[in-house]
Image: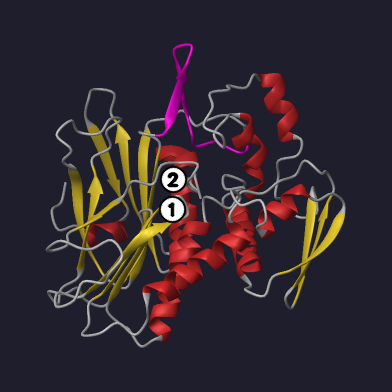
Amino acid sequence: MAHSWKNTIRFLVCLFLLGCQSKKEPVYKEGFVFQGETQGTTYQLIIAEEEANFTQLEIENLLAEFDTVLSSYIDSSLISRINRMEGTAVFTDSTGYFKECYEESIAVFNTSNGAFDISVFPLVEGWGFMQNVETPLNKTKIDSILKFVSSEKDKLHRANFTGQTIQFTKVDKRFKMDFNAIAQGLAVDKIAKFIESRGHKNYYVEIGGELIVKGRNRSQENWNIGIDVPKEKEQTDGVRRLESILSITNKAIATSGNYRKYYVKNGKKYAHCLDPRTGYPVDHSLLSATVISDKCSTSDAYATVFMVMGLEGTKRFLTNHPKLKLDVYLLYDLKNGKIGRFKSNGMKKYFKVNK
């Protein structure tokens, strides 16, 4: 695809790898490394074992199949066809990807009281973020769009699943979905499941910054994951600056942030992260939200939720939802040129160098 799936920048990771790696061929001796391009971004897989029981072609075929269902940038994909339909229509999805992504999205919508909403597509399009154009909306236009933005049950749409069959109904034809804030994480989950089906227990799977790590790395240690310093511009010397280093295994991690993805129009800054409840880009001190959980789709979705909620809203949410077992790290602007940091209790154990 020509565009990334993300509405908000996903900046979180750099993995500390030893030696040079070919883009298309696995690296032997030091572990198997597969790298390539997908979904408008890059992917990287590492098997920290003596052999890899799959080929790169198999991985790329899985990713391509995923695109045919959930990519809003492919006109023939299932989600694109649903977005174009009117009334009621029936579709077939032999992969089950749509159902899984849809049902988890609705669950997060309900739990977050609408801070996460896959029906945000018309707002993303209206603000110009789908086509990378700068088109701020006025209140009248936002209010008109919000009339067909809601994932509330039976309000604007209905989805019924029977086996591989999807019966989808729209109350308003302008209702459209965008899975960008969760689908990439789900793709990581699916690749990880495939790798495990081939017998692997020590691996790293990353797509565009969303990742899962299992077992041990090539040094027989936890995997080391770096979180970038949240700066609006890249370093002029081309060197990535790390804010923190995490030591982690058997978990999924995702980060959402606004500090690089925005536009300025008539002197006002518009972040790409939209609050679907108000229709406006978020405007608060939170720079990034890193979430660790058991599933990458979960980490992906809640990283977006917390960027919408902001610092204090996220703290309240974590207090009220301990059963979700989310480990969270927030970076926020102190307005004096310095960065503030918040770690949930479960997050603290991952830091190799505490800030």
Q: Secondary structure at mark 2?
A: helix
**Compared to 223, does 237 lie above or below?**
above
Location of residue 336 by image quarter: top left
The amino acid type, in three-letter code, at marker 2 is Thr
Residue 314: numbered disc: 2
Q: Residue at x 67, y 20 (%)?
A: 139
Question: Looking at this view, is 287 or 135 the one in front?
Answer: 135
Q: Residue at x 44, y 38 (%)?
A: 310
- Image coordinates for residue 86, horizontal then vertical, percent: 84, 49
- Image coordinates for residue 185, horizontal then vertical, percent: 46, 60
Residue ranking furthest to the bottom: 199
**Residue 177 left/right relative to 327:** right
Q: Is residue 8 visible?
A: yes
The amino acid type, in three-letter code, at marker 1 is Leu
User: Crowding near pointer 1: few (<14 within 10 Å), some, many (20+)?
Assistant: some
**Residue 295 left/right relative to 17:** right
- Image coordinates for residue 207, horizontal then vertical, percent: 39, 59
Q: Is residue 323 visible?
A: no
- Image coordinates for residue 161, horizontal then vertical, percent: 75, 71
Q: Residue at x 25, y 85 (%)?
A: 51
Q: Which contiguous range is marked in magenta?
A: 261-277
**Compared to 41, does 274 lie above or below?**
above
Label pair 1/2, CB-CB below 8 angstroms: yes
Q: Residue at x 49, y 70 (%)?
A: 61
Q: Secondary structure at mark 1?
A: helix
Residue ranking furthest to the right: 87
- Asked whether 63 falls inside the magenta stretch, the response is no
Residue matched to label 1: 318
